[in-house]
Image (tube, rainbow, N blue to C red):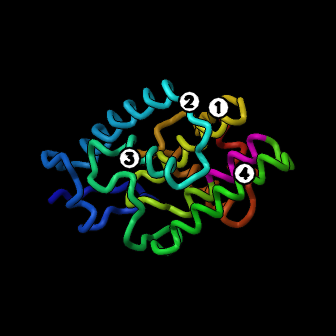
Amino acid sequence: MPDFDYPKGATPIDSNEIVGLLLTHITTRSELDRWEQDNIVMALAWLDQNKPKDIFNERFIKELHRRMFGNVWKWAGKFRRSDKNIGCSWNQIPICVKNLCDDAKLWLELKSESSDEIAVRFHHRLVSIHPFPNGNGRHARLMTDILLENILGRSRFSWGREDLTAASDSRRRYISVLHAADGGNYKPLLEFVRT
């Protein structure tokens, strides 16, 4: 069974979830990252063809995760069944996701905040829920980009212009601005996503 080395701030995959690895030849984190990225490229192609707008529901949130990671993990597209070092209790995920989706629809209806503010708040909440065993940051960033492009008619965020899955200054800054948003200060996150 592989023992992956996780960058600081990453949520480790527990032993019950590692058995869901479909590609048994993977033994290192870099191999896992490469196979997951190949799967994400296929999900991006699907998104380009479909341009979904009905995204504020559990069905779509799960389907996007499945398309991003379904060739790598058996549990892709299924909410986690264990508690992690981040996120709500696993048994609260469906209601937290529903509340987020309902809130996002209301934010769009009221138009009380800028498009970037709506997208940043959506992203932060989805990351905070942490609905899946793995891939939550990548999934939440892609969900946010879909919201920006397909619903708000805006360009995608740059997300610091670096790979946020690997240990880097950008990843450390990203985690730091998410922590600031935990305390209600969204300004650093708003600045980061457009740098």
Residue 4 in the image: x percent, y percent?
Answer: 26, 56
Return the mark for residue 66. Answer: 3
Mark 1 Cα-neighbour bin, 10 Å: few <14, some 14–19, many ≥20: some
Mark earlier in primary sequence (2, 1):
2
Location of residue 31 (image quadrant): top left
Residue at image mark 2:
51
Location of residue 148 (image quadrant): top right
Residue at image mark 1:
149
Mark earlier in primary sequence (1, 3):
3
Label 3 amino acid? Arg
Label 4 amino acid? Lys
Q: Residue at x 73, y 54 (%)?
A: 186
Mark 3 Cα-neighbour bin, 10 Å: few <14, some 14–19, many ≥20: many
Q: Are marks 1 and 3 in contact (CB under 8 Å)?
A: no
Q: Residue at x 62, y 32 (%)?
A: 156
Return the mark for residue 105. Answer: 4
Q: Is residue 139 left or right of residue 24?
A: right
Q: Helix, strand or loop at disc 4?
A: helix
The span shown in magenta is 115-123
Q: Nearer the viewer, residue 158 or 117?
A: 117
Tell me the CA gap for discs 4 and 3. 23 Å
Q: Residue at x 42, y 70 (%)?
A: 84
Main SS, magenta residues: helix
Residue 117 in the image: x percent, y percent?
Answer: 76, 47
Quarter of the image that includes the N terminus = bottom left
Q: Helix, strand or loop at disc 2?
A: loop
Q: Is residue 2 left or right of residue 157?
A: left
